[in-house]
Every structure is written in C-alpha cells, then in structure tokens.
Amino acid sequence: MENAVNSRIKNDCLGNETDKEYNNALNDQTMDIVRHKLEQFQAIILKDVQRHVNDFVDEVMQELRQQQMQSQEFSNFAQHQQKTGIWTNRQMGTIAATATTKTSKGNTTVDHKNKEQHIQETINNAGNTIRHLPDKIFTMRESYLTALLKVDHMKTIYHIFYAIFTVFLLNTIVQDYLANGSFKIGLDTFRTSFAKIQYVLLVWLLQHVFVFGIYYACHLWASWREILQPQSFASKLWSGTCLTLYALSQFSFLIIACFINFTLALPFASGIVLQLESIRLLMKMHAFVRTNIPRVLHGKVKTDDELTQYSIAFPTFSCYLYFLFAPTLLYRDSYPRASRIRWKFAITHLMEVFAIAFLYCYIHECYIVPNFSDFGKHSFNISIITVKLFTSLMPFTMVLLTGFYMILHAWHNFTAELLRFGDRMFYKDWWTSSNYDTYFRKWNVIVHDWLYEYIYKDFYIYIFNGSKLLSSLVVFWISALFHDIPLCFSLHLFFPAMCIFMGLLGVLLVFITRLAPKNFGNFALWFSLIVGFGALMVAYCTEHFARFNCPKLIENWWDHLLPHIWYCYHNNNNNNKI
C-alpha cells in the first residue's frame, strides 16, 4: 500500500514537471511568435519612416534648387558658364546610375557605384580608350521652362502666348461661323490627318511583342555563353550568330514599319506617329543591348545567383519595361524617381499637347492649303517660290517653336510625371546659343545623349582612333538620315531635303558660326533658323502638292528619284512655250 502511494506521488510530481515543461515550451513559443511579429512591425515602421524621410529629402532638395534659381532669376540662365551644377549633363569618371535611386515600386535600391566603376574601368582598359569621355548624369531636376516659369516675368510671357492662341481660336471660330455657319476649329483636318490610327495602334502593339523578345533573346544569349565557356570556339560562333541575327532584326524592324506605311497609305499624322515610334523603339532596343552586352562580355553581369563582389545581376524585365516608356534613350538599371505624381501638372501638359495639335490644324487650313494647294498646276519660277517663302515664315516659325514646346517640353513632362521620372532635362537653353555647335547639343538633349553615348563614343574609341571630327560627321549624317526617313515615308515621296539641310548645310554652319561674337551669333542663329526652317517647310509643301497636281511620268528608274518640283518646272515651262 505504501509503495502504491509513493508511486502515485511520484507520478504526480513527474506530471507536474511535464506540465511545467510544456507550459514553459508554450510560453517560449508564444514569446517567439510575439518577438517575430514585433520584429516584422519594427521593420514595417522603419521602412515606412525611411520612405517618408526619402520623400521629404527629395522635396526639400527640389525646393532648394528652385529657390536657388528663383533667387537669381535670370542670372543663372544668362551666364555662359553657369556656377550651379543643376544643369550639368555629363561628368568625367562618373556613371549615371551610381547614385542611390528609387525603383518602380518606390523602394531604395542598392548603391552599385563601386561595381559600375569597376566594370567601366575594365571596359575602358579592354577597349584601349584614347581618352575617357564623360558619362551622362541622371539627377532630380525640372525642365528649363518649368523652372523659368516660376519667375513672374517669364510667366507673363507664357500668358501672352496663351492669349495669342486664344485669339487664333476665336479667329477660326468667327471665320467658320460667318463663312459656313458652323464651328469646325480644325476638326476636319484633325480627323483626316489621324485617319487609320487604329491600324497604327495595332502595329505598335505587335512591335512591342518583338521589343519584349529582345530582352529574352539577350538573356538567352548570356546564359548559353556561360554554358559554352566564354573563350571557346562554340561560344564565339554562338555570339557571332546572335549578333548577325540582331543586326538583321533591327534593319527588318525599320523596313517593315516603312512598308506598312506605304501599304496602308497612312495619312501624314498617322504615318509620322508610326515612323517616329518605330525609330524610338529601335533606339531603345539598341541602348539596352549596347549597355548590357559589354557587361556580359567582361564577366561582370551574371545570369545566376553566384554574384561576386563586382558582379551585377542581369537586369530584370521590370527594369527593361520601365526603360521602354521612360522619357530617355539611355539605359540604366534605375533612375531618380519623384515621390508622387502631380496630376494637375500632368493634365495641364496633356491639354497643351492637344491645344498645339489644333493650332497646327489651323495653320494647315489657313496658311498651307491656301498658299500651296495649287502648286504645280501653273508655271512658276524662283520669284513665286520666294514670295511664298516670305509669306509663310511667321506661321512656320510658330510651327517650329510650338513643335519644340509640344514634344520636348509638354509631352515629355507629361510622360515623366506619370512615371515619376526625376530627370526632366529634355532640352537645355538652346535659345541663348550663339553658334550651331551649341544649338545642336542643347536643342534635343534626349536624342543628343543617345547619339553621343552609342554612336559618337563607339566611332571615337573603336573606329576613328580618337578623331573628334570624323566621329562628329558620322553623328550628323546618321541624325540627318533618321530625320528624313519619317518625313519621306509619311509624305510618300523621295525628297531628302532634311539630309541636305542637316547633313551638309548644318555641318557647314557649325564651323562657320564657331567664331561669331555672342550677341551677333545669337541673332544670326535665330535669323538662320527662321529662314532655314521656313525654306525647309516650303520645300516639303511644294513637293507634296506638286505630287498630286503634276504627277511625273516614270520612264526610267532614276525618275523615281527626281523631285516632282523639277518635273513640274520643266513640264509647265515647255507647255507655255508651245
């Protein structure tokens, strides 16, 4: 009996100890859960605080930059060599993507400065660089006009242009109502110019399927290159085959767009949208390939998880997708990002784009059609063309200035605001230029950066052995060619006037105006811009209407290359003699 009691007491003690151990384990598990939840909460709080701090710092820095410019009003913009670094576009020995920026999700990315610098040094040593050329800098900054319009004096000029546009609109309404009894305000021209735009949208979507395929093709090439051993014959054969296919695909991409333009007989506006979008996507694809292929070749980009100290993972598709729609042609893994979207700012610029589009319709109906629609029906000489030129200079000057504002300022700021793209320096103060060398660098910074980064640098380093002159000439000729392609295919004619103006006269003006005094040079530049752009527009308008009013006879293959103006001049003069 005593043994049974002792055994029961012993079992009770053991049970109590087991219960205590169980309770302790349960308490420990509960504490672990609570600790884990608290750590998660702490991480969320810190992440949220960090995000708010970053947003606050971005806003403060932007306000400080704005205050710096406003404090001096026009002085910063009038100086030839500006003391502030806000508008610096390039810097020696700096990689644009080295700064800590924000990804598309708004999170702070890892600073890859050391990695990128190591890669750039390797590439420069391998390429036996003659002289290290400066690199593009991406930073948070507004566009020039956005900054200038913070000044009351400039805002007044801006309001004057709004008033002029309102007068044009009222003039159109009054004329339409008194002449036709209805209000058109350019809607017929707008509807006609953008006819068949649905086909352009369909082609644009199909083009993006091809553009997306370029990313996966590059990734596939990089993966198989690692498998085949980089220095092996199989790897070199694989790389050479991929390079050939890439070159053929890019050429075909542009040719197919031109062929579709002709086949569908797209009107001018729809055709120019298709051609410009095709060229933009072509430049985007080349920028991505040209930036990432050297990294892979020098072993600094890996497609697997085995990343070394100086290696960078192959760019994600989200980086590539953001780059395709960002208002820049230079590829970076990340860009400076704004903290929020200013919807009022974005909608205002979108409305300005539509307003200028209707202004173009007004100019077409009131100046271009009355002045050029009968060209080619009657005999003409140089005097008649000169009169048409000078009567059209002011409308065409308005086309030049509003075209700059619509595309380089309003549209790019609209897309940049939607994507929170931080660097808004799409152009510089080209209006203060005293020579064409400066003007070409400041007029369109987006395209100039692409030409400099992927054309000028490659020819300067690898082909012309450090020759600035030859590299610059190649840039001019390529730029002239790709300015002419959209116009010729959109107007459905062969008339390479842009190649002549940019590829020949533009090069000559660069050398002629370099030694001009500042004030006289600025006057000469504006005068030549007004007359030169007017002459270019007159040439395209006369050739376009002569194509319909005086169709030429095609007897030999070179007849396709002769301008309609030339044929009309000789044909009408011969008829008058008879």
Image (tube, rainbow, N blue to C red):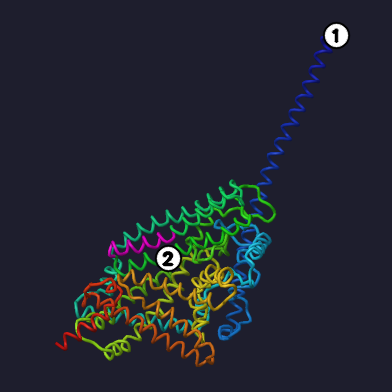
For the image shown, how many numbered marks are present on the structure? 2
Question: Which amino acid type corresponds to the residue marked 1 in the rendered image?
Answer: Glu
* Magenta stretch holds residue 398: no
Q: Identify the image quadrant of the N terminus.
A: top right
Q: Quadrant of residue 411?
A: bottom left
Q: Position of residue 480 (x, y in %)?
A: 43, 75
Secondary structure of the magenta portion, mostly? helix
Location of residue 290 with respect to 45 vertically, above or below: below
Between 466 and 280, the residue placed more toward the observer is: 466
Residue that numbered label 2 is attached to = 279
- Disc number for residue 562: none
Residue 99 makes an appearance in the image: no
Task: Please tell me how crowded label 1 is: few (under 14), some (14-19), or many (20+) other residues with Cα within 10 Å.
Answer: few
> In the shown orientation, is residue 427 left or right of residue 88?
left
Task: Please tell me how crowded label 2 is: few (under 14), some (14-19), or many (20+) other residues with Cα within 10 Å.
Answer: some
Location of residue 420 with respect to 24 vertically, above or below: below
Residue that numbered label 1 is attached to = 2
Between 430 and 417, the residue placed more toward the observer is: 430
Residues in magenta?
249-265
Q: Secondary structure at mark 1?
A: helix
In primary-sequence order, the first of circles 1 and 2 is 1
> In the shown orientation, is residue 119 left or right of residue 441?
right
